[in-house]
Amino acid sequence: MDKYFNNYLIVTIFLVLGILLPIVALTFGRLLRPNKPSDEKAETYESGNLPFMESRVKFNIRYYLFALMFVIFDVETVFLYPWAVAYEKLGLFALVEMLIFVSLLVVGLLYAWKKKVLQWNSI
């Protein structure tokens, strides 16, 4: 029982330090920094040039969809690599689990393909 209490105590100390240290550092920085707001400081900075148009630029939603698809399949490789390295130790159960995981991703890819998310036609 004492062994488990020691483990929980260490986790609790790290959790408290992980929460308190950033709060103390940010509060201490806020108290020490100079605060002299002006209109010039609030203006948009564009590499020393005067801003000549609105800073918000409209992007095509397709960029975000392609980025999301990339992230999904990039994360898939992160899960597949350790499985492939330890395949002999994991056995048939892990193979079935990985096939289910990959099949879910294939279903998602087919759904994106059917909804024509992957086509880049100019409008």
Image: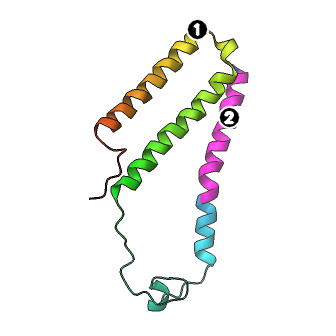
State the mark number for residue 9.
2
Query: What residue would you read off at disc 1?
Result: 92
Q: Nearer the viewer, mark 1 or mark 2?
A: 1
The residue closer to the viewer here, 106 or 14, is 106
State the quadrant of the C terminus.
bottom left
Q: Amino acid at mark 2?
A: Leu
Residue 16, magenta (yes or no): yes
Residue 13, magenta (yes or no): yes
Q: Is residue 13 above or below residue 35?
A: above
Q: Residues within 10 Å of mark 2 (few under 14, many from 20)?
A: few
Q: Residue furthest top?
A: 92
State the quadrant of the N terminus.
top right
Going from N to C along the chain, the mark reached first, 1 or 2, is 2
Part of the protein shown in magenta: 2-22
Q: Is residue 6 above or below residue 56?
A: above
Q: Amino acid at mark 1?
A: Leu
